[in-house]
Structure formats: C-alpha cells, structure tokens
Amino acid sequence: MTSATHPAATHHLPGFITGPGEWDLLYTLTTLIVIASVVGLGVFFFRLHSLPERLGHKKIQFEIVAVLCLISLFTHIHAFWIAALLLALIDLPDFISPMRRMAGALEKLSGIEPEPEPDLIAETIAAHIHAPDVEAVATEEPAAETKPTGQEG
C-alpha cells in the first residue's frame, strides 16, 4: 500500500494534516497541554481553597476555619469559604489567658492548689519521657519483694 494523495485533494496541505499511519504531532501536543492545564488548574484551585487555613493562627480559630473550608469544598457553597477567609484574616483577641489568670488567682486566694496549665503538663510529660533513667526503670522488672536464693524467712 502506498500513501498517495487523493487526486481531488490539493497539493498544498497544511503541516498539521498527517497521512494514515503517521505520528500526529498536533494531537500529541494538544493532549499534553490539556493534561498539564487540568493538573495545574486543580493545584491552583486547592491552593486557593486552603488559603484561609494557612492564614488562621490560633488553634480554635484554625479549627473553625478548617471546618468552614471543608464544608465549602464538599457543598460548593462559596459563602462558607468567604466566611472562613474573613475569620482567618481577623485577629481574634485572647480571652482564655486572662480567664486562666483570674481563675488561678481565685484558687490561690481560696487556698486551693491551682491546676497546672495544659502546656506545662505536656512539657512535663515530654521531659519525663525523654529522661534516660525513666526508660531504664520502665524496662526493668520490679524487684521489691525478691530475696536472694538460699535465704528464707
């Protein structure tokens, strides 16, 4: 079989028209551009969608913003995303620290020993976990009631 041009076809065909069984450069390039565009737009969409989460600073604010972004992502209601973005951009005042100080002062006045703050508890636990003597004690068996062999009574 020869790939001769049809007699009715013009002899000046554009370069993107290929003969049967030949490699189509335009189709390949278009396919690669479409795939790269879809992936690029997806990455851009998800980076833009996570913008409020990257802006949220405090823990409670971050959690609320993250929930609003997830609701927006799954329901396609953009008002949730806008609310999350506005909440992330607003710097919320710290109400918890003064309340903890007041509670600690009231406990001290009443004679009750104040409970340590959660951050101090976490630091204390981390310090005990990483202590070398704690690991050695944890691996040893308790030897409180053991007696040497040969001695009884």
Image (spheres, grey):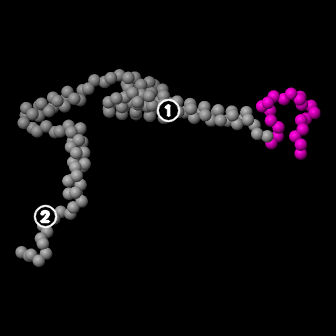
Q: Is residue 57 left or right of residue 122?
A: right
Amino acid residing under circle 1: Phe
For the C terminus, give its image quadrant: bottom left
Q: Is residue 131 left or right of residue 146?
A: right
Amino acid residing under circle 2: Ala
Element under label 1? helix
- Identified at 79% across, 30% down, the residue is 15
Q: Is residue 48 left or right of residue 86?
A: right
- Identified at 89% across, 29% down, the residue is 11
Q: Rate crowding at label 2 as few (under 14), some (14 to 19) or many (20 or more) other CA atoms within 10 Å.
A: few
* Residue 75 is at least partly visible in this image: no
Asked if residue 10 is among those painted magenta in the image, a careful observer would answer yes
Q: Which residue is mark 2?
A: 144
Q: Residue furthest right?
A: 7
Asked if residue 104 is among those painted magenta in the image, a careful observer would answer no
Residue 2 in the image: x percent, y percent? 89, 43
Q: Closest to the observer: 83 or 120?
A: 120
In the image, which residues are magenta? Answer: 1-21
Element under label 2? loop
Residue 18 in the image: x percent, y percent? 80, 35
Q: Is residue 114 left or right of residue 19?
A: left
Circles 2 and 1, Cβ within 8 Å, touching? The answer is no
Q: Closest to the observer: 81 or 33?
A: 33
Q: Which residue is mark 1?
A: 46
Which of pointers 2 and 1 indicates the residue nearer the eye?
A: 2
Q: Name the N-terminal-most of marks 2 and 1.
A: 1
Q: CA distance from mark 2 to mark 1?
A: 60 Å
